[in-house]
């Protein structure tokens, strides 16, 4: 934590946790196709069901309106975690701040690429 920061260690720690969650969610969303080709699904099955999607829908890999709505919600969740993480990054010591911030920005752009690729 930067010496001049007024943030608590707990708030910076929580921001770090948020960054870890955001990155992991992004990894899961980025790799849906690859994972499904290997017979794996890391998406929350209960949320898939709530969206009217099944495991078979994932394995088929067809982009539908249901899939787009589901992915928009998942991407929104990841972005909220990135936003929370970014608040804490600004309180890191300058030697740590820029590499962490750069990784946050780059990983956040993966979500943009998923959207641009029609999910």
Image: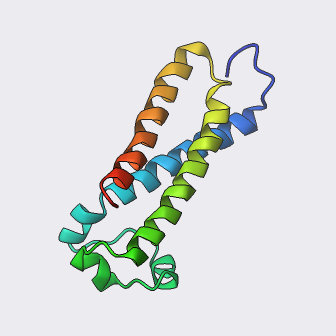
For this view, does 35 lie left or right of residue 66? left
Q: Is residue 69 above or below residue 75?
A: below
Counting labels gives 0
The answer, for residue 38, to whether it is visible in the render is no
For this view, does 119 lie left or right of residue 101? left
Measured from the top left, where is residue 87 in percent x and y? Answer: 67, 34
Q: Name the quarter where the C terminus is drawn.
A: bottom left
Measured from the top left, where is residue 85 in percent x and y? Answer: 61, 39
Q: Is residue 35 above or below residue 15?
A: below
Residue at position x 46%, y 47% in the image: 23
| The quarter of the displayed image where residue 68 is located | bottom left
Measured from the top left, where is residue 113 in percent x and y? Answer: 35, 47
The answer, for residue 32, to whether it is visible in the render is yes
Q: Is residue 29 above or below residue 41?
A: above
Residue at position x 67%, y 22% in the image: 1
| The quarter of the displayed image where residue 61 is located | bottom left
Depth check: give the residue in front, 25 or 65.
65
| The quarter of the displayed image where residue 71 is located | bottom left
Task: State how the image is colored.
Answer: rainbow
Residue at position x 53%, y 65% in the image: 73
Measured from the top left, where is residue 9 in percent x and y? Answer: 73, 32
Residue at position x 56%, y 21% in the image: 97
Depth check: give the residue in front, 9 or 77.
77
């Amino acid at each position: 934590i930067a010496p001049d920061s007024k943030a608590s260690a707990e708030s910076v720690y929580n921001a770090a946790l948020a960054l870890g969650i955001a990155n992991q969610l992004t990894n899961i969303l980025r790799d849906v196709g690859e994972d499904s080709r290997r017979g794996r699904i890391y998406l929350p099955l209960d949320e898939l069901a709530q969206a009217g999607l099944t495991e078979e829908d994932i394995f088929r890999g067809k982009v539908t309106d249901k899939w787009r709505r589901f992915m928009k919600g998942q991407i929104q969740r990841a972005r909220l975690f990135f936003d929370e993480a970014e608040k804490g990054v600004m309180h890191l010591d300058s030697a740590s701040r820029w590499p962490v911030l750069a990784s946050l920005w780059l990983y956040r752009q993966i979500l943009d690429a998923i959207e641009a690729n029609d999910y």
